[in-house]
Each structure stands twice: as C-alpha cells, then as structure tokens.
Amino acid sequence: MLFGGFCVLGLVPAGNGQTDRVSQLISWLKDPAPYLRRDAAIELGQIKDPRAVEPLIASLKDSDAAPRGAAAMALGQIKDPRAVEPLIAVLKDTVWGIRRKAADALGQIKDPRAVEPLIAALRDPGINVRDREALLFRPQAARALAEIGTPAIDPLIAALKDANPNVRYAGVVALGEIKDPRAVEPLIEALKDTDSDIRDAGVVALGEIKDPRAVEPLIEALKDTNVGVRYQAADTLGSIKDPRVVGPLIAALNDSQPWVESQAIGALREIGTPAVGPLIAALKDKDYQVRVDAARLLIERGEPDTEDALVAALNMGGSKKEKNLYDYRYREEKMVEDFLNCGNARLEDAARKWAKRKGYQIGTARGDSVKWGGAR
C-alpha cells in the first residue's frame, strides 16, 4: 500500500487468496438468497477445486431450481466421480431444464455408470412434446451417451429397435457421433426405418463413420421416397469419395428436386478426378439435365482432353419432347453461357457458332458462369 510517500509491501502465502475464496463460495451455497447460491455454484465450477464437490452435491437438492442447475453444471466442470450417482438422481428432477444440465454433466464426467440411466432417460414417458425444455432433454441425453462413448454402444444399438421413433432417432444420432464400426450394420438397418427422420439421421451417421460397408446402402438411399433422405445421401456419398458412388450420383443429377440435383453436383465436385471419365460419358446421357450438369462440372475441372466431348454435347442439343420445355430452354441457354464465359477459347468459339446458328444475340450473361479449371 502507499502511505506517506512510501510503498509498504507485505507477504501473503501462495494460494491463500484462492483458498479463502473457495471457502467463502462454499459458505454462500447456504445463503438465503437464491441468486447468490447460484452464482457461488457457477464460480466454484470455474475454479474446479475438489473441496467444492460435496457442498455442490448437497446443492443439487436446493429448494430453488437456479442453484440446483448451477450445481449440476459445476459438478460437470469439476468431473469428480463422487458426483456421478447424485447427478443420476437429478435425471428425475421435477424441472426438465435441471435434468438436461445433469445429463450434460454426466456426459462431461464420462463415467460408464451413467449409461443405463441415460438410456432410461431417452425412454422417459413423461417427455411432453409441448414443453420445449422437455423436448431438449432427450437430445442432451443422447449427446451425453455419445460423450461417454464405447460403454454406451451396445445399449444404443438396442435403442434402435425401440417402439418410440424419438428414442430410435436419438440412438442413431449418438452412434454417429461415437463413430464405432460396430454400429455400421445396425445403422444400415436404420436406413429401412418407416420414419424418414430416422433414415435421414442414419445416412448422416454412416457418413460420420465412413465405413465401406455403408456405400451400397447409401447408394440405395439416393432413391428414397423422401427428398431429405436423398439430399443427405448425395452429401454423404460425396464425403466418402468411393469410386462406386460416381455413377449413382450422376443419375441423381436427374432428380425431380433441384436441391438434390445441386447436392449431387457438389458431391461429384468433391470426388474430383475419379468422376471425370463417368462425367464425359454422361455428356451423352438421354436426359438433357444430366448432360448440362456434367458439362458444367467438366468445365470446372478444365481437363484438356474433354473439349471435344463438351463441344459435341453442346451441339447435341435436346429433344422437342423434353418433359419440361421451358426448363430445357433455360438449361440450354445456361450451358451456352457457361461455354461463352468459361475462359476456354475453343468452347467460347463453339458457343458463338451455336448462338449464330440458333439466331441468338450475345449480350450480358447472368454472372454465375463457371471458369475453365476453376475447381482444380
């Protein structure tokens, strides 16, 4: 301190400041004010001093929800095994938000003792679809199981056969996050679930694991009756990058839903070189939509030996019997604009000749044309 122009220094034993603070915070856990009890629990979780574990466990029975929730979160941060059984008991708290915090804490501690109680939490019959906090509880329990990892795999696989689709969905998501190969076959079976949300989640989960056994079932998912499942299948197959997926993804360019087509384009772009040969063949596809998409992808690749095939595809044109004449004309014009603006002199010349032959004038393009070799 500064006194009379002199600086007076004193010595304090190392660690005493924090020790005193922990003791003070523990005493505040019994303060009459709920907000002070809550704030004390939050700070104790940040400090992570093991002396706070037993007092925080006692706070799990606080009469006010806010301190209970803060205590659960703090125990998750400290990660002391003494907190596991008390936190398991909190999975049945009267407040859904507190249950959710207990599940999160158990996931952070990663103790196998929590697996069965968390599985039971997935099946909790009291979850009310009209209560937002209740709805968030099941996904949090699933995330906690995923955090625990290997000890949760077999119970989660069993959950895939539960009568409740919400339980099956949560199981699929958790297994995808764990990424254990033992889950591959059960997740493949989930692709046949009657609930499209579960099929969709199964596709995503298999994409996380990236096991070769899943390739053929995921290819089949490109034909799913649900557009969301087809979209996810295209995205997942692109990330797996197995040569077997190229042909089916090219076929998906003809999907009735534009966003599935767009995702198939993205997947083929991600696969890269292995897709070039099949894309050249696709320039002769009977469907004009497939030909236009294949041409755009090949222009992005900028492979020198593809120019002849691209010019031939441009001149091949479409049929007057196209199922959607307006869409066909739009795509035809877009293909020509891609040729005109891609930066390849030969393709530009071919497009100019096409325009002259068809009676078009060359003006300003839409601005989203691709560049020759832009994806390399």
Image (spheres, rainbow, N blue to C red):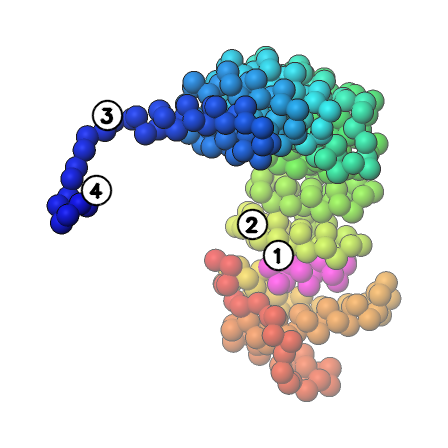
Q: Secondary structure at mark 2?
A: helix
Q: Earlier in the sequence, mark 3 or mark 4?
A: 4
Disc 1 marks which amino acid? Ile
Query: Marks 1/2: CA distance?
Result: 17 Å
Query: Marks 3/4: CA distance?
Result: 17 Å
Give the vertical position of 252 relative to 362 (above or below): above
Q: Earlier in the sequence, mark 4 or mark 1?
A: 4
Quadrant occupied by the N terminus: top left
User: Mark 3: few, some, or many residues within 10 Å (few <14, many ≥20)?
Assistant: few
Of residues 346 and 334, the one nearer the viewer is: 334
- Residue at the extreme left: 6
Disc 4 marks which amino acid? Met
Residue 163: give x, y in percent of width and height.
83, 22
Which residue is under mark 1? 280
- Depth check, mark 1 against mark 3: the one in front is 3
Disc 2 marks which amino acid? Glu
Residue 210 can be seen, yes or no:
no
Which residue is under mark 3? 13
User: Mark 4: few, some, or many residues within 10 Å (few <14, many ≥20)?
Assistant: few
- Depth check, mark 2 against mark 3: the one in front is 3
Q: Earlier in the sequence, mark 1 or mark 3?
A: 3
Contact, mark 1 vs mark 3 (Cβ under 8 Å): no
Which residue is under mark 2? 270
Query: Marks 1/3: CA distance?
Result: 77 Å
The structure residue drawn at horizontal position 81% and vertical position 43%, both measured from the top left corner, is: 226
